[in-house]
């Protein structure tokens, strides 16, 4: 995939403006408004069910927003685990190949950015040091291998 800017640790995160900067704030504002209306509807004692239903619906929409992001990310992480397992079987020395099953999800996800030449040494460091923090592992990478096809 042709990208104009080379990918690095500093710019590898993905921001989707319509999702992150429009949809999320609108859903939060909606929830806050519904909570406000619910509070005053119950305070007045109107007995109407609409503010309660509206608030529950606002909560459900915000939950849907988060699930719409986390479910595809989980599926992507499974694919990354498979891709990295195959890549590691090809690139790691035999002593490390036997330890592929020890890698955690976070380690697989972070190590995908390491170049082929750098992977064996970095994989050993990560396993031996029991480093599981994605950010810490990514910061250890010297030769970045871009991944432009992220969810």
Image (cartoon, rainbow, N blue to C red):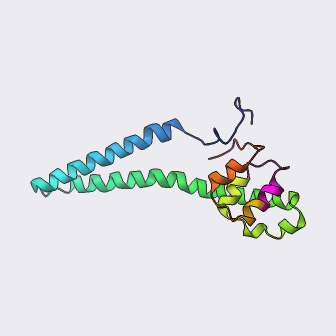
**Magenta-drawn segment:** 112-124
Quarter of the rendering containing residue 119? bottom right
The residue lying toward the viewer, choosing from 93 and 70, is 93
Does residue 55 appear left or right of residue 45 in this picture? right
Q: Is 98 within the magenta? A: no
Residue 5 location, x and y as percent? 70, 31
Q: Residue at x 20, y 57 (%)?
A: 49
Please identify the residue farthest to the front as the structure is shown.
129
Viewer-nearest residue: 122 or 100? 122
Q: Quadrant of residue 11?
A: top right
Residue 26 lies, in percent from the top left, at 38, 41
**57, 7: nearer the viewer:** 7
Out of 26 and 54, give the one closest to the viewer.
26
| Identity of the residue drawn at 85% across and 62% down | 89
Residue 78 shows up from this direction? no
* Side of 5 relative to 87 (left or right): left
Membership of 123 in magenta stretch: yes
Numbered circles on residues, count: 0
Asked whether residue 84 appears in the rendered view, the answer is yes
Q: Is residue 65 above or below residue 11?
A: below
Horizontal arrangement in the rendering, residue 102 relative to residue 31 (left or right): right
Most extreme residue toward the right, as rendered?
Answer: 94
On the rendered image, what quadrant is the N terminus found in? Answer: top right
Give how far across and how far down residue 58 sits, in percent: 34, 51
Q: Tell me: residue 149, above or below residue 54.
A: above
Residue 24: image quadrant is top left
- Where residue 111 sits in the image (x, y, percent)? 73, 54
Which residue does the image show at 64% across and 54% down from the upper left? Answer: 134
């Amino acid at each position: 995939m042709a990208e104009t800017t080379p990918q690095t640790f500093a710019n590898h995160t993905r921001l989707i403006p319509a999702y992150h900067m429009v949809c999320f704030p609108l859903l939060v504002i909606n929830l806050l408004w519904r909570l406000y209306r619910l509070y005053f509807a119950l305070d007045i004692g109107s007995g109407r069910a609409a503010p309660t239903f509206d608030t529950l619906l606002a909560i459900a929409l915000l939950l849907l927003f988060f699930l719409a992001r986390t479910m595809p990310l989980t599926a992507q992480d499974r694919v990354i685990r498979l891709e990295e397992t195959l890549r590691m079987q090809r690139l790691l020395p035999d002593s490390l190949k036997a330890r592929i099953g020890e890698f955690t999800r976070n380690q697989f996800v972070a190590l995908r950015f390491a170049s082929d030449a750098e992977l064996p040494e970095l994989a050993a460091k990560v396993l031996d040091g029991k480093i599981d923090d994605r950010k810490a592992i990514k910061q250890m990478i010297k030769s970045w291998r871009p991944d432009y096809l992220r969810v």
